[in-house]
Amino acid sequence: MDNDLNFETFKGLVSLSMEDLCRELFLGNRESIRIKKEQVAVRNLVKIFNAALTISNAKGFTAMSLRDLSKEAGLSMGALYTYFSSKEELLDMIQRQGRLVVKRVLLSQINGIDDPRNRLKRIIQAHLFLSEVMQPWFYFSYMETKNLAKQEHKRAIESEIFTEKILTDIIQQGQDAKAFRPVQKELAGAVIKAMLQDWYLKRWKYAGRKITVEKYADFVVDLIYTYLAPLPANSIPRSAKTKHDGMPDL
Amino acid sequence: MDNDLNFETFKGLVSLSMEDLCRELFLGNRESIRIKKEQVAVRNLVKIFNAALTISNAKGFTAMSLRDLSKEAGLSMGALYTYFSSKEELLDMIQRQGRLVVKRVLLSQINGIDDPRNRLKRIIQAHLFLSEVMQPWFYFSYMETKNLAKQEHKRAIESEIFTEKILTDIIQQGQDAKAFRPVQKELAGAVIKAMLQDWYLKRWKYAGRKITVEKYADFVVDLIYTYLAPLPANSIPRSAKTKHDGMPDL
DNA sequence: GTCTATACCAGGATAGAC
DNA sequence: GTCTATCCTGGTATAGAC
């Protein structure tokens, strides 16, 4: 039994129901939310965020009117504006909460795992499982980044870079320990990230093919283990042309 | 010298300047464009499409007003409407022209290459080089698919599946010929596609790191060759758990 | 805390002069 | 072929009753 994580276990470890997320969001944004009773506020925030994510992910946040939102959430326009002061603030709240949770969960999941192979496997599994549980949030964050104002936009990019750096650091660590062969870690990190993102961006496709998140995780881990496996001592280099060429990593 | 393609050669082979693309689009849409003189029409279409792609890719097609577009293109609102009859039609035109070119170029590029390894390399290179030349179109197509009406939306998805099927067919062919080891070709195709898409979706990132499209292509080809390489006869399977398990491919 | 009614503006679209 | 002026809908946001 190695350091494997399965999806059910993961779900048990993290509390990420819409209600949990909205409660945390409420507690972290009390100043800007006019409603003071936690019960009421959380109940309505759940309705608002569910509706906002559903509509936005179907036709885009810009195309979602607040009249749409009001109808879908079952609250009047006036009520909506007691939870946020502008449409833009609603956008920011969703993005901020998403980033907060991602950072916390990813870090906690790799904490204490030292072996590079296990660490790499775990971060891949954790990212995929997390994006499965919070699929609408991840999809939304990705698609609506461009609609953020400068400040929040910058934070979104930092968050993206942060995740990627976890990956490249692990690869570096594995190369130092000779557990991985020398490859361009920067590109390797980028394409792993691309594969992780594809899971939540194309979920309809994978669902239609009955591919579970665990199967996808196994596949990605296998692919990347194969690529990073040290060469047997007597073997011919797999590619003379494209192996590590000393290009400086960022 | 194998069947390699470099980016300069590719650009010489295909005619894909904005003017070429707009001329083809004009000739293919004469009914719906009120302007009849080719010279005038093509000149203005270039302005319109450049402006539309620039603004849309910065803040989204929905968020782009026709007043924005009019200003950026240097044409009046009235003039714009002689080239398309509604904002939605403009969207459809961009998407249709994009799909048309992608299909034609990809098929022509792999035509005549029979060896599965070379064929796989070529399709990866061709897709990356094409998306490099037409980056704004690719980015736009990806991001604005959800804004399409039902019919066009369906076509966009078909086009996506089409590209992926080229990949999985090549993998199948390579497996039949024992040039590739048995893997889940459906998942392999999906993640290759994800890597190809990352190139045009995150171009700012790669540009900032001074990674050229050729370097990226080499990296992806190397990664996937390594993964698909047949196992040496006496070796231990790389992963007992995740190798091909007879899951039906779609 | 929540609703209804309304202000006000920006959006897509078009008519008709040139 | 192109522009300006204008129409009208539907958007965000708020005031004030309950």
Image (tube, coloured by chain):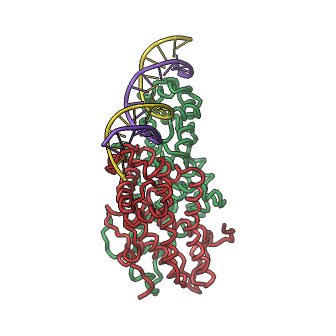
Chain colours: A red, B green, C yellow, D purple
Quadrant of res A77? top left
State whether residue C12 is above or below residue A115.
Answer: above
Q: Tell me what residue is drawn at x 52 percent, y 80 percent.
A: A111
Q: Is residue B152 left or right of residue A32?
A: left
Residue B109 visible in the shown view: yes
List x then y, in percent, for residue A34.
Answer: 45, 53
Taking depth in this image into account, of B139 and B228 the one nearest to the observer is: B139
Quadrant of res B55? top right
State whether residue B95 is above or below residue B192.
Answer: above
Taking depth in this image into account, of A128 and B158 the one nearest to the observer is: A128
State whether residue B248 is above or below residue A32.
Answer: below
Q: Is residue C4 left or right of residue B1?
A: left
Residue B122 visible in the shown view: no
In the picture, the quarter occupied by the N terminus of chain B is: bottom right
Taking depth in this image into account, of A250 and A76 the one nearest to the observer is: A76
**How many numbered marks have been drawn onto this rendered protein structure?**
0
In the picture, the quarter occupied by the C terminus of chain B is: bottom left
Q: Is residue B78 left or right of residue B218?
A: left
List x then y, in percent, for residue B236.
Answer: 45, 86
Taking depth in this image into account, of A244 and B76 the one nearest to the observer is: B76
Q: Tell me what residue is drawn at x 38 percent, y 48 percent.
A: A79
State whether residue B71 is above or below residue B226.
Answer: above
List x then y, in percent, for residue A106.
Answer: 50, 72
List x then y, in percent, for residue D9.
Answer: 37, 31
Q: Tell me what residue is drawn at x 66 percent, y 59 percent.
A: B210
Q: Tell me what residue is drawn at x 58 percent, y 33 percent.
A: B73
